[in-house]
């Protein structure tokens, strides 16, 4: 019985040992296969970092209005006799737009002119009699006073008659008529809007922290979106008082509207341009990756110069890579994760380039670019597309036939 038990125990040990040995052999073979498996280089787009002229700005949203724009109305009551304009018609200053019924006023004016002529004749007779010595001074003074009164009456009735005419106060574009012929109108009833579209202005607000940076005459750009700002202007007015509720300061600027695309009432992106700064290191925003560990970019370098760990932009110390960028940590202790990327690095050496993760300190953003305060230097080749598949030390192939960062080039360079 004991002999049988010993034989069964020996067989059980042999079977279990075989199973354990097979599993260890299989795991070792799998590790060797993946460790020595060639790593295909990933295709990325890059841009070379070069010092540039940085034009900082203050971004805001503005409302367009006409430098000269009014809603026209009549000065007196009456019935509309003629409408002498059409919608969207260019009118000149002083042009008659609407004529009210003025028959009564014309008749009163003719009567006053007749009386003025009669009083003038009486004055001439009084002067002649005075010269011949048969007229008195009192008669001459009365005749002169009557004539002056008649002149004033004519001027008054002429002014009343002019009130029956609505004239353009300035040159511009007239809007849609809001009255009809035969309609009874009174002061305050809107007739049409008149806007001078050649001279526009924009009103916008700026945070009080940026108030010291504003000056009269500063250049301003406008556009329908932040990537395209074709219109130019300058600040013409700054409210000296900051709103105590919103903590914003009101600013007014002029706009050049050569193509006539802008209209009063529109919203525009506004960018107040501040003095330019030279030798600023900036990269396209598409190159920047944000994570819980901080902001970083991938720099393409020769395989022999790649670093094992990404460096902190401020201290230079090694920084743990984000979870998605870390090598597997569940490998056996005899094969550290820092050693195994050597196979990928060897493959990258054949290609000649690998991606190195570099943590950076960022500054301002403008025109699709972000300022790099620390971490990247002039001459570095930064990945702008394809970095979502990269890890520190990944071999890469550069293909710049499609560059998504080209849309974010600063206008100062393009101009």
Image (spheres, helix red, strand yellow):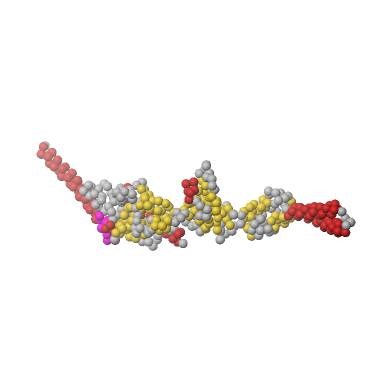
In the rendering, at what x and y percent does residue 141 appear? 83, 53
Main SS of the magenta part reads helix
Region in magenta: 342-351
Answer whether residue 347 is magenta in the image: yes
Residue drawn at x 76%, y 52% is 156
Quadrant housing the N terminus: top left
Residue 91 is left or right of residue 255, and the answer is right
Q: State the residue in front, 304 or 108.
A: 108
Residue furthest to the top in view is 1
Residue drawn at x 72%, y 52% is 183
In the rendering, at what x and y percent does residue 347 appear? 27, 58
Q: State the residue in front, 135 or 274.
A: 135
In the rendering, at what x and y percent does residue 60 appear? 50, 51
Q: Quadrant of residue 395?
A: bottom left
Residue 149 is left or right of residue 174, and the answer is right
Answer whether residue 315 is magenta in the image: no
Residue drawn at x 51%, y 59% is 230
Residue 318 at least partly seen: yes
Residue drawn at x 10%, y 39% is 3
């Amino acid at each position: 019985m004991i002999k049988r038990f010993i034989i069964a125990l020996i067989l059980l040990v042999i079977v279990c040992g075989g199973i354990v040995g097979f599993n260890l052999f299989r795991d070792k073979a799998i590790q060797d296969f993946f460790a020595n498996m060639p790593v295909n280089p990933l295709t990325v787009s890059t841009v070379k970092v070069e010092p540039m002229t940085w034009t900082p700005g203050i971004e805001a949203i503005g409302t367009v209005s006409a430098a000269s724009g009014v809603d026209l109305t009549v000065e007196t009551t009456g019935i509309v006799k003629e409408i002498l304009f059409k919608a969207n018609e260019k009118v000149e200053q002083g042009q008659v737009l609407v004529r009210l019924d003025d028959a009564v006023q014309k008749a009163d004016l003719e009567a006053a002119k007749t009386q003025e002529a009669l009083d003038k004749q009486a004055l001439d007779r009084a002067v002649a009699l005075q010269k011949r010595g048969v007229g008195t001074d009192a008669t001459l003074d009365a005749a002169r006073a009557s004539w002056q009164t008649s002149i004033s009456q004519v001027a008054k009735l002429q002014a009343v008659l002019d009130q029956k005419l609505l004239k353009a106060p300035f040159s511009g574009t007239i809007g849609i008529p809001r009255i009809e012929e035969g309609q009874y109108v009174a002061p305050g009833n809107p007739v049409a809007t008149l806007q001078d579209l050649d001279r526009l202005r924009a009103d916008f607000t700026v945070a009080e922290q940026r108030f010291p940076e504003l000056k009269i005459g500063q250049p301003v750009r406008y556009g329908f979106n932040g990537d395209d700002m074709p219109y130019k202007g300058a600040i013409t007015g700054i409210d000296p008082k900051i709103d105590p509720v919103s903590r914003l300061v009101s600013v007014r600027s002029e706009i050049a509207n050569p193509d006539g695309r802008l209209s009063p009432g529109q919203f525009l992106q506004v960018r107040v341009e501040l003095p330019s700064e030279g030798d600023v290191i900036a990269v396209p925003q598409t190159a920047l990756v944000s994570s819980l560990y901080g902001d970083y970019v991938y720099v393409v370098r020769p395989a022999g110069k790649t670093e094992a760990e990404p460096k902190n932009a401020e201290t230079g110390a090694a920084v743990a890579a984000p979870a998605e960028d870390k090598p597997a940590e569940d490998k056996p202790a005899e094969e550290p994760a820092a050693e195994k990327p050597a196979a990928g690095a060897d493959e990258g050496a054949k290609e000649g380039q690998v991606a190195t993760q570099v943590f950076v300190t960022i500054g301002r953003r403008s025109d699709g670019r972000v300022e790099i305060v620390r971490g990247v230097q002039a001459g570095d080749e930064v990945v702008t597309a394809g970095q979502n598949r990269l890890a520190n030390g990944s071999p890469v192939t550069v293909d710049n036939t499609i560059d998504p960062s080209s849309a974010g080039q600063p206008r100062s360079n393009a101009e």
